[in-house]
Image: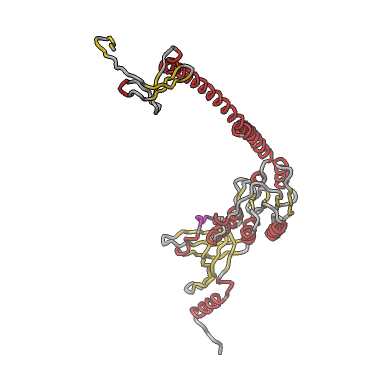
Amino acid sequence: MRNVYTVAQVNSYIKNMFSQDFMLQNIYVKGEVSNCKYHSSGHIYFTIKDARGTIACVMFAGNRSGLKFRMEEGQQVVVGGSVEVYERDGKYQLYAREIILDGAGYLYEKFERLKKELAQRGLFAPEYKQPVPKYIRTLGVVTAPTGAAVQDIINITRRRNPYVRIILYPAIVQGEQAAASIIQGIHALEQLGVDVMIVGRGGGSIEDLWAFNEEAVAQAVFDCSVPIISAVGHETDTTIIDFVSDLRAPTPSAAAELAVYDVRQLEAVLDSCKGDLTRRMLTRLDRERSRVKQAQTKLQYLSPASQIREKRTLAMRMEEQLSALMQRHIREKRYLLGLYTEKLKGLSPLDKLNQGFSYVSDEKGKTVSDVDHVRVGDRLTVHVKNGRIEAQVVDKEKWKQEKGVLEA
């Protein structure tokens, strides 16, 4: 006898089969949106279809936080979620956890997710940015060997500084092989030891530029020990490596200007420094010459020969002063001597003797000026102008003085 099952049993069995299928539990389905309805409860009911079929979908309100746009009829979307059976109706439907726009919209959503993830991992942190050297000798370029981008970089580099060496790694910058080629170019130029590296290409759609949004390329840029300048697309284009690189340039031409210092500006700076140095040197030389002249003058003044001449001159001047003082002193003394001589002449006994006077001394040589000092019989000596006379007192008489007259 055959087994007979209820409808609920069959639906439950089919639901279990769906739930045990790993692919159906995490699947992405691409199609066009139709019959889209936003329910008052917050749920979204819609259908995605292609040329050969349709599938019912629902996104519950709890999963809508990840939806970045409002769904509309005719949109091409990629719905991520699980395919399960709704037992009551016996129908399967796609329970959406994630909905992203297909094509450029899909890539934009992927771009935003990767950007957020890498930012959380710290790949955009400013503390990891390496400074781009101001003066370089070797410039590495990772880009396509043909096209306007590489020509712009070469032309601007030659114009700004023809002494800079350019090493080009001819990378694939579009398509499935582009990411691996760009990574190989970064590693190759890093091993060559270039001073700075430009990684980029010309403009294009987001699909054309997508290789520069790959996580592996961003990691290679972050890990590179050489400073990297990103130069992808036009000024309005933004890629992941623009956030990871050490410096972002809006265009490849701008990257070359940022990487290569204009040698003409350097020459102008050097000329200015040269002029300033020359002026400073001339000023210093003039100051030192003045100091040398002052030192020479001081040396001449303080030299032994100069000191001897100065002391000799001083000695001669002092000798003259001393001689003048001595002459004056001699004149003064001669004058006094003359006065004393005249005075002495007036007091000299010899002068009196020459005039006919004489003086008498006793036996002891004392001058006899008083009659009371001798006695009769004393021997006296009489001094005259040309000799002496020995005499003896035979008599004495004392004079009497009355009214100015001497009497015997």
User: Residue 161: horizontal and vertical position, in percent?
Assistant: 71, 42
* Residue 337, above or below 43: above
Q: Give the range drawn in magenta.
A: 68-73
Question: Is residue 247 shown in magenta?
Answer: no
Q: Quadrant of the C terminus?
A: top left
The one nearer the camera, 177 or 59, is: 177
Q: How many marks do you count on the picture?
A: 0
The one nearer the camera, 49 or 185, is: 185
The one nearer the camera, 134 or 293, is: 293
Q: On the image, which quarter does residue 292 sit in? A: top right
Q: In which quarter of the image is the N terminus?
A: bottom right
Which residue: 49% across, 62% down?
45
Q: In this view, does 272 lie to the left or right of 75?
A: right
Q: Residue placed farthest to the left in the image? A: 403
* Residue 123, above or below 333: below
Q: Can residue 41 be seen in this view?
A: yes
Which residue: 67% across, 45% down?
260
Q: Most prominent secondary structure in the magenta stretch?
A: loop
Q: Is residue 33 visible?
A: no
User: Residue 184: horizontal and vertical position, in percent?
Assistant: 71, 60
Q: In this view, does 378 lie to the left or right of 81?
A: left
Question: Is residue 71 shown in magenta?
Answer: yes
User: Residue 268: horizontal and vertical position, in percent?
Assistant: 66, 36
Colour pattern of the rendering: secondary structure
Q: Residue placed farthest to the bottom in the image? A: 1
* Residue 18, above or below 55: below
User: Residue 203: horizontal and vertical position, in percent?
Assistant: 66, 48
The one nearer the camera, 196 or 133, is: 133
